[in-house]
Image: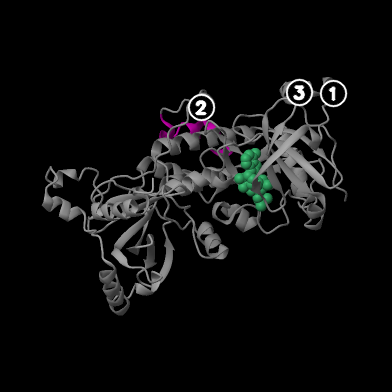
Amino acid sequence: MSLSWPNRRPSDSEAAAMSTNNSAAKKPIKKTPEDFIFGKVIGEGSYSTVYLAKELSSGKEFAIKVLEKKHIMRERKGDYVMREKEVLMKLNHPFFIRLYYTFQDEDRLYFVLSYAKRGELLDYLNKLSSFDEHCSRFYIAEMVLALQYLHDLGIIHRDLKPENVLLNDDMHILITDFGSAKIMRPEKEERPKSEDSHGRRRNSFVGTAQYVSPEMLTNKKTCYSSDLWALGCIVYQLMSGLPPFRGGHEYQIFQKITNLEYEFPDGFDKVTRDLVENLLKLDPEKRLGCPEMGGYGPLKGHPFFKNVNWDSLPDETAPDLLPYLPATSSNPENIWSSYRPGLDDKRIGEIITHTVITEEERRLRLEKQARENEYHRFVENNLILKQGLVDKRKGLFARRRMFLLTEGPHLYYVDPVNKVLKGQIPWSRDLKPEAKNFRIFFVHTPNRTYYLEDPKSHSQEWVAEIEALWHEHYGLKK
Ligand code: ATP
């Protein structure tokens, strides 16, 4: 097989013309790599490198995906690349990455794509752990509209996940990655080599373990409804911080999926739960939004989407991204009432325990720490200034860790049961602690906000200690 294709993706105006069905009337424009200035690399896939590039004639920015022909041939990914191109060429919708041109030279294939300036939705999710209801609703509603459009075209995505949801400059979604997509073909049309006579793929599974549908696992069949299953997993993840089916190995995850084995964490909103339960149905014909259940009307009518204006969604201003931190009995919203007003010496003493230490004192304390503190071995011989058990939250999930604030500065956290160092919160000038209430405090870093919960309700002490250390290291150097 040789890898080449006609240089035929139209310019913007031609694309518009194509969408109104008169593509034959216009002559396609030939582009070459010389028509673009290639800037930085913005991403790497298994078979491609994606560059930020500027078109010389228009000054517009694009993402150009470059694929080495030899590599594609060697890895036998020709079908995958061709399918991605075929699907991209059919798409013309604000919620999808758009393919503007394709061209090639002797060694490479080039896809000129819309540039998703804000990157992946997954990065934002990782930073915040979970989204509040308003944000989740906005992004899920956009995905629903996108899937409706895709399914109307007869295309199944088959690998929908937060990583494949990119964001444009205005923080609206741009769905990408169509290498695993399936175009539902009329009976007589030629099948891709990887599919059998029933339109099933010969591969064991397509997609990503956490989001793969049970029908894909049990009978290797996909249908439109498989994307709705993935959507259900994403709704759960946006609101809770983790996908519903988790495990150490793919096999464990697959077992949980086929047994519909998942739970809702404490604090999961009831209406959202109902939506998830209606999407995560083992029988694909019972999922809300599938053709057998009446299509997208009933899905869009679910109470979760109350007040969503479907027609204006692409033009709406995207909401500020905020984490989902519902009040629970152990985490009440308003706890300030339990403190007396004012900042007298006693209160300062309660809050701040940090003091300046002399060299001699440090030496003695370190010696004592090495002798007596079982956590000394995790802190690289740094003096521990504060330690305590803290629940490290990811969305609605939490893991208890021994937090060790040390000179350096460092903030180590250790699994207290297995006595294993799990990580460190990276320090920099941009690190900022913040108390939400007397149990919960945040540590903001450039790439992630850590949600921490002090079961002993001394979150302010942690914040004060971290702040004091920050001032010691960064405060004077400003
Ligand atoms: P794989 O091929 O291994 O499944 P992938 O699908 O993520 O990986 P690519 O589509 O080549 O591979 O994308 C590589 C990276 O480049 C992605 O992680 C994505 O963040 C980034 N990227 C891809 N397309 C764009 C785009 N249009 N705008 C901005 N970034 C993009």
Magenta span: predominant SS is: helix
How crowded pointer 2 is (Cα within 10 Å; few <14, some 14-19, many 20+) is rated as some
Pick the residue in front: 195 or 81: 81
Residue 79's place in the image compared with 371, above or below, is: above
Q: Amino acid at mark 3?
A: Glu
Q: Residue at x 16, y 55 (%)?
A: 349
First in sequence: mark 3 or mark 2? 3
CA distance separating discs 2 and 1: 34 Å
CA distance separating discs 1 and 3: 9 Å
In reply to whether residue 300 is colored magenta, the answer given is yes
Q: Which residue is mark 1?
A: 27
Q: Which residue is mark 3?
A: 14
In the image: residue 42, left or right of residue 337: right
Q: Amino acid at mark 2?
A: Leu
How crowded pointer 3 is (Cα within 10 Å; few <14, some 14-19, many 20+) is rated as some
Q: Look at the numbered disc 1 and give the secondary structure of its residue.
A: loop
